[in-house]
Amino acid sequence: MTDSSEHFTNLTASCHCQANQYTFSIPNSSLPLIAYLCHCKISRRISGVLFTSYVTIPSTNHPPHRSALTRYKSSSILTHHFCTTCSTHMFLEYAADGHWEVATGTLDRSDDEIIDFKGHMWIEDTTDGGGSVWLPSLGNEDKPAERWLVAPYSSPEIPLDWTAKSPLSSHPPPETEKAEAKLYAHCHCNGVQFYITRPKLITSSGPHAPNYPDLLNPYHSSPPNAISNPSAEPWWLRPNTKYLAGHCACPSCRQVSGFDIQQWAFVPTSNIFLPDDSPFPQQERLWGSMKAYRSSEGVVRRFCGRCGAGCLWDGDERAGGLVDVAVGLLDAGTGARAEGWLEWWCWRVSYGELGINRDLVESLEGGLKKWGEQGGKLGPCD
């Protein structure tokens, strides 16, 4: 959207529930805005996604109105502002110079004319490279994405196969996940904490899930028989006692999180326990600082009311026995991808056709397929 003078472009940021809307102007000479995908622990724990992204709001604009936002100071450097009602992460406020940044997933436009994703930063915090391994390029297959160990241009650039065992890392090599019987999860403020146990065929295959998820079969383009699950196959269980995990680019996930891509793991509630070893609370389904938001009919999303971290997706169609767990909360020994616990679906980004940033979604889908082929992941029964 270009204003009447044609020298500026107006962008509007909105949360999912529309309680927060903010319009700001950018000089056309400043477009596209530069963005990096951040993989730091704070970003993951405060959002529930594996990588976040923001762009700077020019200082010529007035600061956002904040009456419907919750303020959370994650460090001496940064303050996050998220919607009190629906949890959308909207803005970053920097203490050093007072400048503001806006989350890319909240914008009404984030195509390549508006945002130029240059690469990845703070990969060191992932231990295993995190989601950066699925995005070796960003919108241009012939141009590798920048990969920074910490901050861009002030830390070393690293190769695609970097892990914490690499010489450049300041972290010690991670412990193996093979001995882990529990996988802990928590938000940044620790107001929401829980742990997941290994799946067992009998107890973990019990949830009623009549349909396959869009991750496996596109909801809008697959024939009905491809969506239905008449044999009640426990599709969420994977070989070697793992759970299925994948990416979603649907408008609701984007607008509720504030970021373009959300990562979910499908976990039965029978395998989720609270820190005191009590079972998943099936009735109220809330604990700690958790709040609930009904994002659409039959869907409730649960998030931390203190730091705004997305935690769970809970759908009525699953009869309460299966939930989506935000992967960014997981504290796996080998790294952000938690591959000792999760089997990543590499053949589709769920609702990718609805993603507002097509270049980013297509780059992720392409990178996932290559990663899956190289790892021998051949399909749903591998």
Image (cartoon, rainbow, N blue to C red):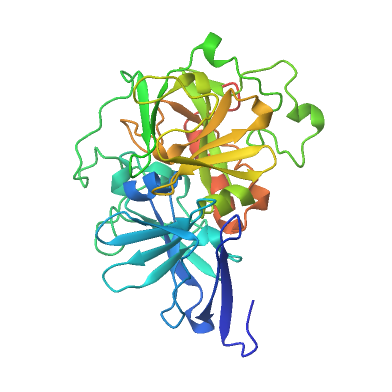
**In this rendering, is residue 228 above or below 106?**
above
Q: For the N terminus, give its image quadrant.
A: bottom right
Q: In this view, does 191 lie above or below 82?
A: above
Query: In the rendered view of the protein, which quadrant contains the C terminus?
Result: top right
Q: How many marks?
A: 0
Res 237 quadrant in image: top right
For residue 100, side relative to residue 113 (left or right): left
At horizontal 27% and vertical 62% (from top left) the residue drawn is 77
- Residue extending farthest bottom: 5
Q: Which of 215 and 22 is in front in this view?
A: 22
Is residue 6 depicted above or below 282 in this figure? Answer: below
Image quadrant of residue 97?
bottom left
Residue at 55% across, 63% down: 20
Name the residue located 37 percent from the left edge and 50 percent from the top edge: 43
* Of 285 and 55, the residue lying toward us: 285
Q: Is 29 or 139 nearer to us in this picture?
A: 29
Residue furthest top in the image: 202
